Image: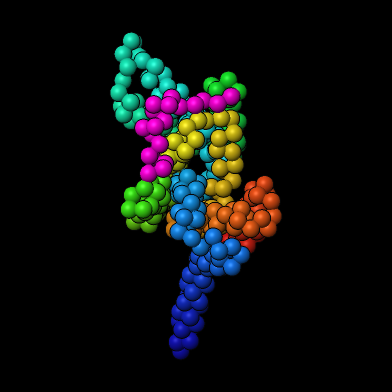
Amino acid sequence: MRPAPTEAVQSGRALRFAHRLYALGPLAGLILLCMVGTLLNRDFATLDNLMNVLTRTSFIGIIAVGMTFVIISGGIDLSVGSMAALIAGSMIWLMNALAAGVGGHTLAPLLILTLGIGFALVLGGLFGCAHGLLITKGRIEPFIVTLGTLGIFRAVLTWLADGGALTLDNSLSDLYGPVYYASLFGVPVPIWVFLVVAAGGALILNRTAFGRHVQAIGSNEQVARYAAIRVDTVKIVTYVLLGICVGVATVLYVPRLGSATPTTGLLWELEAIASVVVGGTALKGGEGRVIGTVIGAILLSVIANILNLTSIISVYLNAAVQGVVIIFVAFVQRGRR
C-alpha cells in the first residue's frame, strides 16, 4: 500500500537531478568552449591570455552580479552601460576640478582620488535608488524606467563632455593607474575585486533573509506581500545594489583609458543581461545563482576571445553573437519559473 509515496520520492529525486543537470549546463559549456579554443589556437591556453580574459570579464561580471538580484526579483535594468558612462565622466570631471584647486587651495592627489572613487560609488547607489523609487512608488514598469534613463544618462555625459571626451589629469592618471594595471600575487586587481563582489553577492543571495525575499518576490510578488515581505523596500535595495556594482566596475574601468566618452559602456547592458541569463537565472524571476552568473560572464568573454584569436567571424559581430545567445537561452527557458 506504499507505492504512491515511493513514486513521489522518485519523482522528487528526478526533478532535483534534472535541476542540478540544468545548473551544470553553463559550466559544461564553458569547459567545452575552452577545449575548442585550445584546439583552434595555442595562444588561447596561455596564462597571459587567461588573465586577459578574466580582467576584461571583471567589469561586466561585477555589474552582472548586481543584475542577478534585479532579474531574480522580476526586474530589469537597461541603463547600466549609460550609467557607467555618466559615472565615469562625472568622477573624472570632479577629480579634475579638485586638482585645479578649490578656493585657491589644492588638495593632495591621493585625497582627490579617494573622493572621486567615493563619489562614483555614491552616485551609482543614488541612480539605483532613483530607479527603485520610480518602479515601486511610481508604479512604472522597469523596462520603461531604465529605457528612459538609458537615454538620459548618455545625453548628460555627452553634454558634460561637450560631445567629445573627458580626460583625467595626467598627475592623477599616473596615481590611479595601478587600480587597473597592478597585480596581487600575479593576479590583476580587477579580478580580485570581481571575486570579492561575486563571493559577497553569493553570500547575500544564499545565506540571508534578504536573498530569500528577493527570490520569493520574483517567484510570486502577491504571495510575498501576503507573507509580510516588504516588497517595495526589497526591490529598491536590489536596484541600489546594482547601482553600486556599476560604480565599482566604473572605478576599475576608468584608469584603463583615463577618459570617458559618449561611447563608454556601450552595450554593457546587453553583456550583463546575457551573462545573467546564460548563467541560468530565469528571465521571469524567482530563481538564479551568482556563481552561474560568474560562469556566464566568463563564457561570453571566452567566446569573444576565441573570435578575436581565430577570426572565425568578424569581431564586429560579437554583439550579434551575444544577442543570439540571449534569444536561444530565453527559448530554452520558456515556461520555466
User: Measuring 53% from the left and 45% from the top, which residue is drawn there?
Assistant: 75
* Residue sitting at the far top: 104
- Let me know if residue 206 is in the magenta part: no
- Residue 17 visible from this viewpoint: yes
- Let me know if residue 176 is in the magenta part: yes
User: Measuring 45% from the left and 59% from the top, which residue is drawn there?
Assistant: 47
- In the image, residue 91 above or below residue 235: above
Q: Which residues are magenta?
A: 164-182
**Front in this rendered view, residue 97 or 82:** 97
**Front in this rendered view, residue 14 or 164:** 164
* Residue sitting at the far front: 42
Q: Give coordinates of residue 297: x percent, y percent.
A: 51, 53
**Front in this rendered view, residue 298 or 216:** 298
Q: Is residue 333 left or right of residue 109?
A: right
Q: Give coordinates of residue 59: x percent, y percent.
A: 47, 45
User: Measuring 43% from the left and 26% from the top, which residue is drawn there?
Assistant: 170
Q: Give coordinates of residue 87: x percent, y percent.
A: 47, 31
Q: Give coordinates of residue 158: x percent, y percent.
A: 58, 25
- Residue 125 visible from this viewpoint: no
